[in-house]
């Protein structure tokens, strides 16, 4: 839907500056050679200063900026560029002021080191690094020359080496004066699937022992957060007659709500998982493809357990206070003599919550897959580090596969023009949303968990808003910009929010942020 709307902000902005994000220091490389990094500019900007970190306290630095004809060849191949800036013998405790315009699409190489006859390079860890220009992603890669930048004056053959260590140079940049920008930044919520998993290909790396987590049912999916506790089976627990790669069904006193509906029984597979009925099979191979294609929802793990191994523990079931407890109680891995593994799945028939409680895990046998499957083909978001996610905002398992709402402008915000602010990737059933406008943006985001939107961030102040009704998962809002030159440099932040019941306690999702910098060109 397109709604007529004119935005006029009576505030004059300034040209913003930032330090280009650099990877962390990992060590100093000492040689009569020079290293740095290269990139392809995603937008226009101006380099305003350069400085080589001097961890060795050498005292002087040399830097060079090159315009390259294309991505430099991988070593030992070489190319030459056009020198845009060169300086040597400058104090290393001071940044070097420059004014180097960079255009979108240009490939730029930056070399730098401290020292004279020997160059001391500030190295990062191996590999490329995801940097950004005012929020626009940009990859930087290792770049170098087999020469001494201080003594040669630069303009030497150069090469790339994507897997190698980047030579760090601190670069300050500014937006091009008089040039309008529309820059997306941050990440919206939620980029989600009906299924989540973590694969431990090597069983010795399983890191969930002595940990518990609860999947809180939202009515459509789950939010998984730390919590819950293992409850030792009581004398009333039933020992399930399960063999190798087998399943059995146990009755519940009340219906259990889940992603696929409700069930009055649980099907327990000896290989570590529970389903709301038969149909998921009894496989023991922990493959993401199989988990993502689960015909029915399931919870737990996939691992080759065998409770019929001599001296193995057993699998037990009992229900206490409306909660069904399924416990692998010291169960051995297939074709082993122990030790056994002990873990428990708890099914709360009142709330639909599922708790995973791990005690000791053997660390032997085949690999493990731990997670929740939504039932039916699900979007693959890749391997989730469950421990890391629980230490952060938790894990969303959605009722349907989702993409985070994506916000962008369909043109640069030049004064006197009308541009479209477009939001896409909305849920097809979303019926109502709002475009939020502010004169302040928050590049790293303000967490919205306290407002019922865990894992979401606010990227702009809310100084104005306009409601919209999406059509087929998209919406577009025309925005007419003022013509007066006094508005050049004004910054406007934009973010979209959309109502979507049951996705979280607030019933809402938000997009990334969008920074508009108004200018004549």
Image (cartoon, helix red, strand yellow):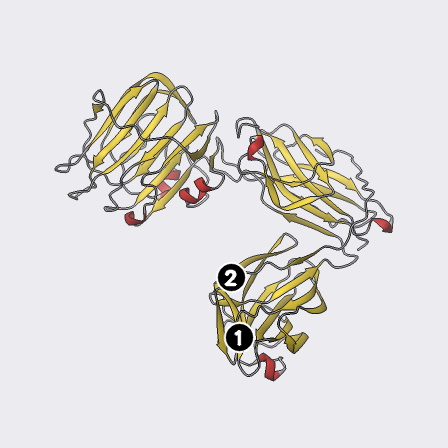
Can I make out residue 380 in this image? Answer: no
Residue extending farthest top:
253
Q: Identify the residue at image location x=16%, y=43%.
A: 335
Residue annotated with mark 1: 120
Residue located at (42% from left, 31% from top): 215
Quadrant housing the C terminus: bottom right
Quadrant in the picture for residue 332: top left
Q: Indicate the quadrant where residue 47 lies.
A: bottom right
Q: Which mark is residue 128?
A: 2
Q: Is residue 347 visible?
A: yes
Q: Is residue 56 above or below residue 469?
A: below
| Marks 1 & 2, CB-CB < 8 Å contact | no
Residue 410 pos. (x, y %)? 70, 46
Q: Secondary structure at mark 1?
A: strand
**Is residue 448 or residue 78 the one in the foreground?**
448
Lateral position of residue 253 relative to residue 122, left or right: left
**What is the CA distance from the residue labelled 1 to the residue labelled 2?**
21 Å
Q: Which mark is residue 81?
A: none
**Count of picture labels:** 2
Q: Position of residue 241 (x, y in %)?
A: 18, 27
């Amino acid at each position: 839907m397109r709604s007529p709307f004119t935005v006029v902000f009576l505030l004059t902005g300034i040209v913003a500056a930032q330090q280009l994000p650099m990877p962390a220091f990992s060590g100093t490389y000492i040689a009569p050679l020079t290293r740095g990094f290269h990139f392809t500019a995603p937008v226009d900007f101006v380099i305003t200063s350069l400085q080589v970190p001097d961890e060795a306290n050498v005292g002087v630095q040399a830097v060079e900026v090159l315009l390259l004809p294309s991505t430099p060849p991988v070593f030992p191949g070489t190319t030459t560029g056009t020198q845009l800036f060169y300086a040597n013998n400058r104090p290393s405790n001071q940044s070097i002021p420059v004014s180097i315009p960079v255009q979108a699409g240009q490939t730029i190489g930056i070399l730098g080191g401290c020292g004279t006859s020997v160059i001391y390079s500030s190295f990062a860890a191996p590999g490329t690094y995801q940097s950004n220009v005012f929020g626009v992603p940009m990859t930087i890669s290792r770049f170098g020359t087999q020469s001494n930048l201080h003594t040669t004056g630069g303009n030497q053959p150069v090469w790339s080496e994507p897997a190698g260590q980047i030579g760090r140079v601190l670069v300050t940049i500014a937006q091009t004066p008089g040039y309008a920008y529309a820059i997306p930044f941050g990440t919206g919520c939620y980029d989600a699937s009906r299924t989540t998993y973590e694969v431990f290909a090597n069983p010795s790396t399983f890191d969930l022992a002595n940990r518990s987590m609860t999947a809180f049912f939202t009515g459509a999916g789950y939010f998984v957060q730390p919590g819950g506790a293992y409850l030792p089976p009581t004398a009333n627990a039933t020992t399930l007659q399960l063999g190798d790669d087998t399943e059995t069904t146990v009755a519940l006193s009340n219906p259990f709500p889940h992603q696929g509906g409700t069930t009055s029984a649980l099907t327990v597979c000896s290989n570590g998982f529970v389903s709301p009925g038969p149909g998921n099979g009894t496989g023991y191979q922990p493959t993401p493809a199989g988990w993502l294609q689960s015909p029915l929802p399931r919870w737990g793990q996939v691992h080759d357990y065998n409770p019929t191994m001599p001296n193995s523990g057993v699998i037990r079931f009992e229900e206490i206070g409306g909660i069904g407890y399924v416990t692998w109680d010291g169960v051995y891995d297939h074709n082993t003599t122990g030790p056994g593994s002990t873990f428990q799945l708890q099914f709360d028939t009142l709330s639909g919550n599922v708790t995973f409680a791990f005690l000791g895990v053997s660390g032997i046998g085949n690999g493990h897959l731990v997670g929740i499957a939504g039932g039916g083909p699900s979007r693959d978001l890749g391997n989730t580090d469950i421990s890391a996610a629980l230490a952060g905002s938790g894990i969303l398992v959605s009722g349907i596969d989702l993409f985070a709402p994506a916000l962008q402008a369909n043109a640069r915000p030049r004064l006197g023009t009308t541009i479209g602010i477009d939001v896409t990737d909305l849920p097809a059933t979303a019926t109502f949303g709002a475009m939020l406008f502010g004169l302040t943006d928050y590049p790293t985001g303000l967490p919205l968990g306290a407002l019922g939107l865990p894992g979401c961030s606010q990227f702009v102040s809310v100084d104005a808003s306009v409601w919209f009704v999406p059509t087929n998962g998209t919406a577009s809002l025309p925005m007419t910009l003022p013509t007066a030159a006094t508005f050049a440099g004004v910054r406007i932040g934009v973010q979209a929010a959309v109502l979507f019941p049951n996705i979280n306690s607030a019933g809402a999702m938000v997009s990334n942020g969008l920074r508009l910098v108004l200018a004549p060109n």
